[in-house]
Structure formats: C-alpha cells, structure tokens
Amino acid sequence: CERSSWESPDWEAPAPGGWWRVVHRPLVFAVARPIEPTLPRGQGHHVENIMKIMQEIGRTDDISQRHYAGEVLAMTGERHWDAAENTYWLKLRDEGKFGEQWLRMDAVSLGLGTFIEQLPSEGRPPPQSAREEHSRVITAAMDLK
C-alpha cells in the first residue's frame, strides 16, 4: 500500500508551524477546511457544516483524514481561530487525498480534550524517538487497512 506524504514526511523539510504529535486516543480527524463537522458529546455530524466543506472543495466523498495517536505532523504557519469552538485550527504542511488538511488543537468544547501537542523542536526536525514512534503508528495503521 502506497504511503501518503504525512505518513512518510520529509523530516528535514521546513515546518514553519512546528512539529506536532497526535495525543488524543485512538485518533483524530483532519478535515479539508477549518470547519467543525461534528456535534458536541458524540451527538453525530453537523450536516450543514459537512455540506459547506464539500461545497468549498467540490467533492462529495472524502473530506476527512484519520490521524492516529503517536503520529507526528508538520504544520505550516497558517492557523485559523474558531471563536465558536474556542480553539485554533492548524494547517498541515502535507496534503491529504482531498487536498489541504486542517486539524484542531483541541476539542474541549466537544468534551474530548486535547488533540495535538507541539513538540519542542525549535525549528529543527523532531527527535529520533518521535520519528520512530510515528513510524510504528503508521505501520500499525497500514496493517489494519
């Protein structure tokens, strides 16, 4: 199975927004636009928001991408404040199968806690231990496919 760019990232390429680790278990979803597609406390999907995302990207199928706890993701410097959800959305450097990916920092407003944490890389690639964990997580995810 062929890997996507975030699954085998270029660790040496610039990540202006830093390197972030997925900490929410078992996974989180990145979406094609910084619009919340789910309702609080597991009440389902926010249909109007899902339709808005689909319309903006011109697709009716995939608008989200799973990212598993332990993955290490490179971010651009672009972020969007979501006043309704009281969190930032960060844009991933590496695109998904549907184009750009946006991931919210937390989902406290949905009762789900922190999604991602920034690694203390100070502009450098993430430490070897984070890269190895990322590789293990991706390999395990690929085995499930």
Image: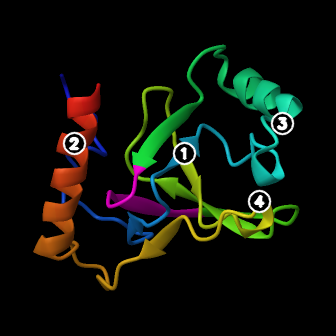
Which mark's residue is nearer the viewer, 3 or 2?
A: 2
Magenta span covers which residues? 68-78
Cα–Cα span, label 1 and label 4: 15 Å
Task: Name the secondary structure under disc 4.
Answer: helix
Q: Any magenta on residue 71? A: yes
Q: Looking at the image, is mark 3 or mark 1 nearer the viewer?
A: 3
Name the quadrant containing residue 141. top left
Left or right of residue 86, residue 10 in this image: left
Q: Pinpoint residue 96: horizontal percent, then vertical percent.
A: 43, 35
Mark earlier in primary sequence (1, 4): 1
* Residue in view at x 38 percent, y 67 percent: 21
Callout 2 secondary element = helix
Identify the disc placed on residue 30: 1
Residue type marked 3? His
68 above or below 79? Answer: above
What coloring was used for the rendering? Answer: rainbow
As drawn, the label of residue 19 is none
Q: Residues within 10 Å of mark 1 (few under 14, many from 20)?
A: many
| Residue pictured at 19% horizontal, 25% vertical | 2
**Residue highlighted by disc 4:** 110
The reply to whether residue 3 is visible in this rendering is no
Dot 2 corresponds to which residue? 140
In primary-sequence order, the first of circles 4 and 2 is 4
Tag in front: 1 or 4 = 4
Q: Amino acid at mark 2?
A: Ala
Locate the N terminus and report the quarter of the image it occupies.
top left
Cα gap from disc 4 to disc 2, whole angstroms: 28 Å
